[in-house]
Amino acid sequence: MTQFVQLLVSGLAVGSILGIVALGFVLMFKSTDVFNFAQGDMVMVGAYLCLGSLTVLDVSIWVAMPVALLLAVVLGLVIYRFLLRPMVGSPLLTMIMVTIALSLMLQAIVVIIWGPQTYTFPSTLPLKVLDIGGVRVSTVDLTIIAVAALAITAFGAFFRFTRLGLHMRAIAENPEAAAVCGINTNRMFATAIVVATVLATIGGILLANLQIVSVGLTTIGLLAFPAAVLGGIRSIPGAVVGGVLIGVIGQLCSGYLGRGVSTPVTFGVLLLVLLLRPEGILGRKTVARV
Amino acid sequence: MAFLNGGHRLTRYSQQRALVGRPAQAVGLLLALLALLAVPRVFGDRLLFGYVFTDQQLLGIGLAQINVALIAVIGAMSLNFLVGNTGLISTGHAAFFCVGAVVAGYCHTELQLPFPLILLTAGVVGAIVGVLVGLPSLRLSGLYLMLATLALHFIAIYLFQRYQLEFFGPGGVTYGQASIGPWILNSDARWFALLVTCVILLALGIRGLMSSRHGRAFIAVRDHEVAASSMGVNVSMAKLKAFSASSFVVSAVGAAFAFYIGIITDESFTLAFVLGYFAMIIMGGIGSASGAIMGALVWTLAPHVLRTVSLQVDPGTPLIGDRLATYPSQFASLLLGVLIIALMRFKPEGLNGLLTSLRRVVSAWPYRD
C-alpha cells in the first residue's frame, strides 16, 4: 500500500509536468492545426536555456528561470516567423516534416553548444524525505506538484478571464469565425506557439530539477503525445488530465513491472485509446466532411 | 532543346509502359549500368583505369557507406510505397526492421537456415506482422494512424529488447556470415552487387505494381477512400495488401541489414531512425520511387560528406571551427534540417520535383514552359 502511494505521488509529479507540456501542445494543435513533433525537444531546450542563463549570466537560479522563459518567448516567435508562418495551409505531411526537421535541428544545436554530457541544476528545491503515516514522500515531488498546479491554474485563469485568453479560445474553436469577428489570427497563431514553447520550457525546467539536464529529456517530452490523445487531442483540460494519468500509469508500471516497461505500456494505452475511443477522455466526437 | 524534343509525344500505351520508350533512354540506361559496374572499383578500390582517387575527391564515401545507403534506399522505397502511393502514414518502419532482425537471428542460430531462405522467411513473417499492424489502419487514418503505429514501434522495440536479453545478452544479437549457396558475402563489393540487384528488382516490381490495377486501387485509396469504394475497390483489402507488401520488403531488408552489420541492439532502431526514413521520402518527393532513392542517398551519405568537408576546415576558425571538428554529425543533422525546411517551403514536391522542373525547363529551352 505504501509503495502504491509513493509511486502515486511521484507519478503525480511527472504527470503534472507532462500535463503542462501536453497543455501547450494541445493549445498549439487546436489553434494552428500543427502537430508539433518538436514538443519533446522544446522541453529539452527549455531546460538547457535555464542552464545556459545560469552559466553564462552567473546568477542564481531564481533569476535564471525568468530569463529562460523570456528566451523561450523569443524562440517561439522565431519558430512562428521562420518555420510555421510560411507553411500555413500546407498539407499534413509537409507540416509534420517541418516539425520533424525542427526537432532534428534543436537536438543538433543543443549538442553543438553544450555537448552530449549531462548537467545538474544547483539544488534549489528543498530535498527532504517526509514520512507521512509510514509513506515516504520526497519534498521535491510535492514542490513540483504544487508549482505545476500553480502554473496550470495561472494559465487557466489567463484563458478564462483575460481578453487575450478569450481571443485565443476563439481561435482554437474556429479560426475563420474568429477572423470574421475581427481577431488578428496571425497574432493569435504567434501567441499560441509562444505559449506552447513557454509551457514546454516550464515543463523542461521542472523536469530537469526532478532528474537531470540531458538530451534524454526529449524522450520524456515525447510522452506528451499519448497524454494529449488520452485526454482528448482537442481538449485543453483533457491535456492536463491525460498528462497526470500517463505520469501515474508510467510510474506504477516502473514500480510494479520493472524499468523499461513503462514506455511500451504507456504507448500501449495510447493504442487502446486510439482504437476504442479516439476522441479521448474529455474530447468530443468530430464529424468530418467526406 | 525545344527543337529536339518537339516531336516525341507518346502515341501508344505500350510506349508508356515500356521500360525503354525511346532510343535515347536505352543509351541512358546503358550508361547507368556501366556506372554501377564502375562503383565498386571507384569507391572500393579507389582505382579506375589506372587513375587513383583520393579520399577528398570521392567526398569520403566508401563502399561500406554506399551499401548502408542502398539498404536505406530499399527501406525508403517501400515506405514511399506505403505512405506516398497508398496514403497510409505509418511510423512502424523500425518495428519491421526489428522483425527482420529477430527472424534472421532465430533462423540463423536455432534453425541454421541458408541466407536466401532466411531473407524469404523474414519477409513472410514481416508480411504477416504487417497485416496485424495494418488492422488499425482500417479504423484510423492520417494523424491517428501515425500515432497508433508509433505506439506499435515502442512495443516492438521492447519485444526486441526482451528477445535480445533472453537469447543473446546485453551485447546485442549477433549474426554470422551470409552466403548465397557457394558465393560467400564476405566483401563490400559482393554485398554491393547483391544490394544493387535488389534495388533494381524492387524498382521494377514497384513500377509494375503501380501500373497494374492493384496500383491504381492503392492510389484511389490514397486520394479518396469513399470514392474508391464506390468505384468497386475493396478498401480494406487494398490497405492490408499495401501493408503486407511493404512490410515484406522491409523485414527482408532488415534481415539483410542485420547480417551486413553483424550485430544489432535495441539502440539500433530508435525513433530518430524512423523519422529519418520519413525525412528521406519527403525530401525526395512523396509518391515517387526515384524521389525515395534520391532522398535516401542524400540523407545517408550527407553526414559522411560533411565530415570529410569539415576536416578541411581549420579548427582555428572562430566560433564554429572546433565545434565542427568535434560534432560533425550534429552539423550534418543541422544542415539536413535546414535543407528539409527550405525544400518544404519552396519545393514541397521534393528533389524529384526539382528534377522534373529542371527537365521541363531544359526541354522547353529557349522558350519558357
Image (cartoon, coloured by chain):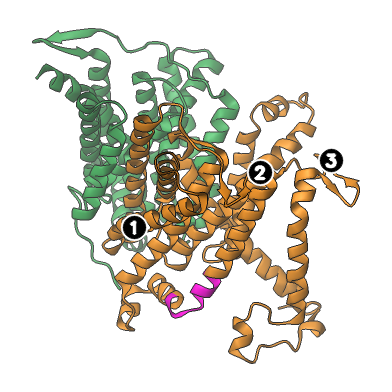
Find out whether residue B209 is within the magenta segment: yes
Q: Quadrant of residue B188?
A: top right
Evaluate whether residue B134 shows in this view.
yes
Dot 1: chain letter: B
Residue B246 marker: none
Marks counted in the figure total 3
Image x and y of residue A154, in percent: 27, 32
Label 3, label 1: how many angstroms apart (C-alpha)? Answer: 47 Å
Residue B54 marker: 3
Q: Quadrant of residue A279?
A: bottom left
Mark 3 or 1, closer to the camera: 1
Q: Residue at x 28, y 58 (%)?
A: B136
Q: Are marks 2 and 1 on the same chain?
A: yes
Find out whether residue A77 is within the magenta segment: no
Residue B65 marker: 2
Residue nearer the viewer, B24 or A128: B24
Magenta highlight range: B206-214
Image x and y of residue B163, in percent: 35, 36
Q: Which chain is orange?
A: B
Q: Which chain is green?
A: A
Dot 3: chain letter: B
Can you identify the residue that label 1 sits on? B128
